[in-house]
Amino acid sequence: MTPRVKEILSWYRSENPGVLSNLRRLLCTGNLAGTGKLVILPVDQGFEHGPARSFAKNEPAYDPYYHFELALEAGCNAYAAPLGFLSAPAADYAGQVPLILKLNNSDSLWSDENPCPAVTASVQDALQLGCAAVGYTIYPGSSERNVMYEDLREITREAKDAGLAVVVWAYPRGAQLSKEGETAIDVVAYGAQIAAQLGAHIIKVKAPSAHIEQKEAKKVYEAQQIPLTTLADRARHVIQSAFNGRRIVIFSGGPAKGDAEVLEEIRGLAAGGSFGSIVGRNAFQRSKPDALKLLAEIQQIFRG
Ligand code: FBP
């Protein structure tokens, strides 16, 4: 336990000892243990985007065992996946890396302007797998958002009763948001706020752009001259929007890109106070040696 981890846990003091222990597990595992930073491997893309789009670039990644090995060898704080990918090899890796079970998922075979993921696993599944946390995606901006918020309310209550931490993927999208608006600074910050209000312990958002989607918000951003020029400015604003930095906010890696681009983005996020990153495609769509090298560089940046 380091002073920084103690400080972070103090923001969650209203939670029970089970939840606090699991947050501590997440913060005190892997190469970044004790720093207050997290690098998590998420592998739900097989479900979300389909197997070929996800794994054909690096064929070993079709194998659910591969991702446990990758998370362990890379010294990640945790590994997040849907029920099938987690449970297939889970017995062979019991207790070796903190797990986050994604409790809902969408597929790409049906495109819906207003998506609503299916609930694909339960808190009971997470307990049986020995998970540290459950994960849940909300799509603020979808006409179905209230279904997700209300399901999450129930899941959060159940997870916390069982002593599990709650990680929320806050991904605004829906008919009334433009494509650019999905990552607009005002929208990403709003998504982070909603996730915090819904009881998330860890909030995962996409890296925000400088675009402002909502007219009423734009007036305030301009009047208050909220700095948005650099990625660091924007990351700082998103983190401020999640209870003034009293919630762990991490940023997703996005589609696969070159090392230099990934690292530049991570530097910007780290400079803005990001608590870390959740890096999927930019990890498992590279050969394992390349992924290990990149993840080590990412961890080095967050370590400072
Ligand atoms: P990546 O690093 O691959 O972007 O993974 C993060 C993630 O949140 C995954 O958990 C999820 O499958 C994916 O992004 C969703 O991406 P999109 O919303 O673009 O379909």
Image: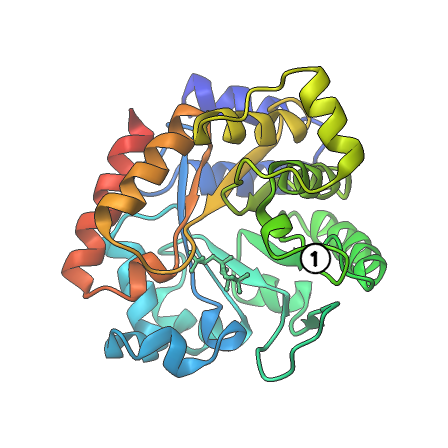
The relative height of residue 101 versus residue 216 in the rendered view (above or below) is below
Give the SS element for disc 1: loop
Foreground pick, 123 / 150: 150
Residue 267 in the image, given as x and y percentages of width and height: 33, 32
Q: Is residue 164 visible?
A: no
Which of the image's four quarters has the N terminus?
top left
> Can you identify the residue that label 1 sits on?
139
- Residue found 48% across the figure and 74% down from its top: 87
The relative height of residue 90 versus residue 141 in the rendered view (above or below) is below
- Residue found 50% across the figure and 40% down from its top: 250
Q: Residue 284's quadrant in the figure?
A: bottom left
- Residue found 78% across the figure and 60% down from its top: 148
Tell me if 269 is positioned left or right of 111 in this view. left
Foreground pick, 263 / 297: 263
Residue 34 in the image, given as x and y percentages of width and height: 38, 29
**Crowding near pointer 1: few (<14 within 10 Å), some, many (20+)?**
many
Tell me if 270 is positioned left or right of 69 in this view. right
Looking at mark 1, is its residue's CB closer than 8 Å to ligand 1? no
Q: Residue 2's quadrant in the figure?
A: top left
Residue 185 in the image, given as x and y percentages of width and height: 60, 37
Q: How is the image coloured?
A: rainbow
| Name of the residue lying farthest toward the left | 289
Tell me if 212 is positioned left or right of 296 in this view. right
Q: Amino acid at mark 1?
A: Tyr
Q: Is residue 104 visible?
A: yes
Which of the image's four quarters has the C terminus?
top left
- Residue found 74% across the figure and 51% down from its top: 156
The relative height of residue 161 versus residue 116 in the rendered view (above or below) is above
Q: Residue 135's quadrant in the figure?
A: bottom right
